[in-house]
Each structure stands twice: as structure tokens, then as C-alpha cells.
Image (spheres, helix red, strand yellow):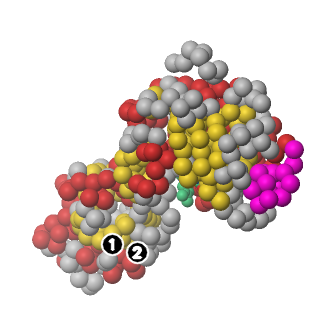
Amino acid sequence: MSSRRIIVVGGGAAGFFAAITCAETAPDAEVTILERSSQFLSKVRISGGGRCNVTHACFDPQELTARFPRGAGALLAPFKMFPASDTVAWFESRGVKLKAERDGRIFPVSDSSQTIIDCLLHAAKGAKVRLVLNCGVKRATKRVQNGFELTLSKSRPTPPRNEPDAQREPLKGIAEERRGAAPRPEAVPFGKDDGEQSGNEKLTCDRLLLATGGCRTAAAGQLSTSLGHTFVPPVPSLFTFHVENPWLRELAGISVETVEASVPDARLRERGALLLTHWGLSGPVILRLSAWGARTLHGMNYRFPLHLHWLPGLDAESISAGLDARRQTQPARLIIHSPISPLPARLWEQLALAAGIARDTRWAGLSRAGRHRLVQQLMRTEFQVTGKSLNKEEFVTCGGVRLSEVNFKTMESRICPGLYFAGELLDIDGLTGGFNFQAAWTTGWIAGRAMARRPGSRQA
Ligand SMILES: Cc1cc2nc3c(=O)[nH]c(=O)nc-3n(C[C@H](O)[C@H](O)[C@H](O)COP(=O)(O)OP(=O)(O)OC[C@H]3O[C@@H](n4cnc5c(N)ncnc54)[C@H](O)[C@@H]3O)c2cc1C
């Protein structure tokens, strides 16, 4: 029997990174990942539109933390230990070629998340991590004589879709054992020497890592709370805004490179690209507002006024001067047909109409009052947000295990020795752009290294 038995609950980005790091650092330790679903790394698969935005080309730890609405302070030391450059090196040293796009997002050159999945599965197999699918942990208790006892929940294994061999293999091992079939020798990590177990429903381990991902409800954080931790109530982050406005909907599909969007009631203000959609507003600037304001906007039940400045950087005076110049240079042109750069023509037309400019008004006929209304419209179009959009699955959850209860030098619980955390289960969430995976890799790596240490050896 191995001197150390380490169980990682959750076969996502953080769980894999931790398990691989731990098994590579301590080859004598027995490291197992338990995944309740029938697939490992399912979020990695769908991430980045199927391309997996692995991390971000932001190599300064302090700067990196500024992309985290929650967790910035706690992540500074971890990002010094395992920064984004280490993530790039980690994957590239394992044969994954990565590329940075102009906005800093880093993807595999293959533009396929399968490359990342294959790499992680291959690394886990190479490090002899035991991979178990269809094996949820429903209860975890601290044992009197040290370590943990886990109660498993059964789920019927479903054949994985077109998975590579590494992913199919564990189904034949533990999963078959759980169905009553004879297990293959190398796939019998539990039960045989645990004595107290029956039907493989209970497992014991010396160290336990919870890497179960973002929770939609507080109840989903039950494993951590049952071991004494506080769970900051989860609310969605990174969502789009629902706006009921007829002219806006007609413009679905149009994007504007830079706008300034603000929610005065929540004191939120962001700049960035905006996308007009069938249901309202999306794009990086909206996602950033939703992340920074996740809890406040939840408190407002996602109903609030939103202001858009379509020409950020320009004040009323310079916009007015631009309109006057048009009056001089193009007096006979219809206002609605001569957009101000860089606004798309159809958007300009709707903004002019919304400012009360008649369709047949020419620049020469723009009154002082009309010019004032147009300037106001360009600087402060107000929309009433009436909800958050259900366009996509929410990307990320704000909330999770309270950060002050975790030692970020090791990712070990300050409340329950031997218990570790990594990934989105923590009250950490980042903006879009590869930051959430970076937090998962970093916290997973640190937890993996710490769990690999021999009991009694000095820890940070
Ligand atoms: C559509 C979408 C696209 C995204 N794109 C990106 C992107 O491009 N870049 C980026 O940085 N971030 C992206 N994210 C966010 C990113 O996927 C997550 O932050 C990241 O996956 C978190 O990793 P994790 O390992 O903590 O959790 P998860 O990846 O959620 O993994 C947790 C695992 O634990 C398992 N589990 C849960 N409870 C139990 C239990 N009791 N027993 C056993 N197993 C359990 C779950 O089934 C799951 O497989 C995206 C998210 C979504 C939803």
C-alpha cells in the first residue's frame, strides 16, 4: 500500500493540474481523481467556443490579479509562484503549441480544446494518476485517526462520446468494478485494503482536494461546509444584459469597437467592445460590468438603468464641434445618412432618430436644440436592463469557499488540516480572457505540490 493516498474530487482543470503535479512530485503517492460525470474536463472541452482560452499573455502577477473581481488579493502570492508564463511553459514542454491573439488571449495553435484535454489526460496517465468516472462524492468526513472518509454516490456509467483511450480507460477500471464486473488489477485502488468498505461506496484518504468547480447553489458547496468551511453564497458572473428596446433589436449583430458603459446605481463603469444582440447587449464591456457588479446587480434583481457613451474620450464640446463641421461641409446631406465615425451607419441612424432628428432633416437644418439632443444621445443613451440574458450557460460563478479560510501558499484549509482547495470552488472569479483557467492551473499546481509533501515535512 502507498504511504500516501491522495484523492482529488472533481476531474476539471484544477483537479487535473493538482493531481498531475502531485503525482509527478511524489511518485510514491497514490493519487486518484474522482469525477461524478461520465467525462473528464467537460468545461475545458466547451471553453473558448471549443478552442480553450488556456490563459492570458499577462505575465506580471500584480497586473494579472487586476483581472479578478474576486480573489485579487489572495491570488497575488500564488501568481508569483505559478504565473501565466509557467502555464505556457507547462503546456509547451508537453508538446502543446500555444499562440497569443492580439487581445492577449492564449489558445492552442490547433484552435481545439481537444489538444488541451489530450495533453492533460496523457500527463495524468504518464504520472499514474488513477482516473475514475461516474463517481461522485456525496459526503466527506474527517476521520479520528487522521485523513478522510468519503461516501460515494453511484451513477450509471454512460459510454463517453468519442473519447480518446486515456479517458475511456478508467471506465473499464473503477466504473466496471462499481457495476460488479471483475476489475483489472491496475484499476483497484480502493476497497481491497480499506477493510471497512463495502461495495466500494466508501473510500479513505490521507489528503483530500476539493476541486468541484463553480456552484450554482449554496447546497452544492456542501462538501466544504460539512468540513467546517464557510461558503460565500454563489451568484452568476459574466452574463449579458437583457434590454427590451425595439430599435436596439433591429440592430442585432452590430458591434462597436469601444464604448463606455456605466451603471450609475452600482457605480460601475467600463470601456470596451459592445455587441448588440436579439435580446439586448453583450460583448466584453458588458461581461466586464457583469463580473465587477455580479453581487450588486444580483441584489438589483438585474433591473437597472444602463448608460452608453458611444464616443468615449470625446466630451460634449468636441462632439458638438464635430457636428458643426458636418453642417459646414455637408449641408445638403441627410443627417441619418451621414454617420459620425466610427459608428456603424445603421446604429447612427437609430441614434439620430432616438434623439428626435426627423428622417428628412439635413445638416443645414440641424437646430441648436437638435444638436444638443444628438450630443446627449451620443454621450448618454439610456437603456433599461430588465434581466440577464440566458443566451449561454453562465460562464463562471462568483462566490464559493471563503478565501480567508485557506492558506494560499499551500491551498490547504486553515480549518481542517489535510483538506485542500483549488479552482472555481473558491470565492475567486476572473474576467473573460483565460483568467479563470489561470486561477485553476495556479491553485491546482500549488495544491498538488503541497499535497505531495510527506506528512510532517515543513510546509509554507
Ligand atoms: C461555456 C464556458 C466557457 C468557458 N471558457 C473559458 C475560457 O475560454 N477560458 C477560461 O479561462 N475560462 C473559461 N470558462 C471558465 C472555466 O471553464 C472554469 O473557470 C474552469 O473550468 C474551472 O475549473 P475547475 O476545475 O475549478 O472546475 P470545473 O471545470 O467545473 O470542474 C469541476 C469538476 O468537478 C466535478 N464534480 C463536481 N462535484 C463533484 C462531486 N461531488 N464528486 C465528484 N466530482 C464532482 C464536476 O462534474 C466537474 O467535472 C468557461 C466556462 C464555461 C461554462
Residue 365: x percent and y percent?
19, 77
Please identify the residue farthest to the left as the structure is shown.
369
* Cβ–Cβ under 8 Å for marks 1 and 2: yes
In the rendered view, tell whether residue 149 sits above or below residue 89: below
Residue interval drawn in magenta: 169-185
Residue 330 occupies quadrant: bottom left
- Looking at the rendered structure, the secondary structure element under dot 2 is loop
In the image: residue 106, left or right of residue 187: left
Residue 77: x percent and y percent?
47, 26
Identify the image quadrant of the N terminus: top right
Alpha-carbon distance for marks 1 and 2? 6 Å
- Looking at the rendered structure, the secondary structure element under dot 1 is strand
Amino acid type shown at disc 1: Val
Task: Please tell me how many numbered marks the rendered image carries.
Answer: 2
Residue 151 seen in this snapshot: yes
In the rendered view, tell whether residue 433 sits above or below residue 81: below
In the rendered view, tell whether residue 129 sits above or below residue 361: above
Q: Nearer the viewer, residue 318 or 132?
A: 132
Q: Nearer the viewer, residue 81 or 240?
A: 81
Comes first in the chain, label 1 or label 2:
1
In the image: residue 231, left or right of residue 81: left
Magenta segment includes 17: no
Q: Residue at x 29, y 58 (%)?
A: 297
Magenta-colored segment: predominant secondary structure: helix
Q: Residue at x 73, y 33 (%)?
A: 30
Q: Nearer the viewer, residue 128 or 392?
A: 128
The crowding category of the residue bearing disc 2, from other C-alpha atoms within 10 Å (few below 14, some 14 to 19, many at least 20), is many
Amino acid type shown at disc 2: Trp
In the image: residue 332, left or right of residue 419: left
The residue carrying mark 2 is 279
The residue carrying mark 1 is 243
Q: Residue at x 39, y 46 (%)?
A: 231
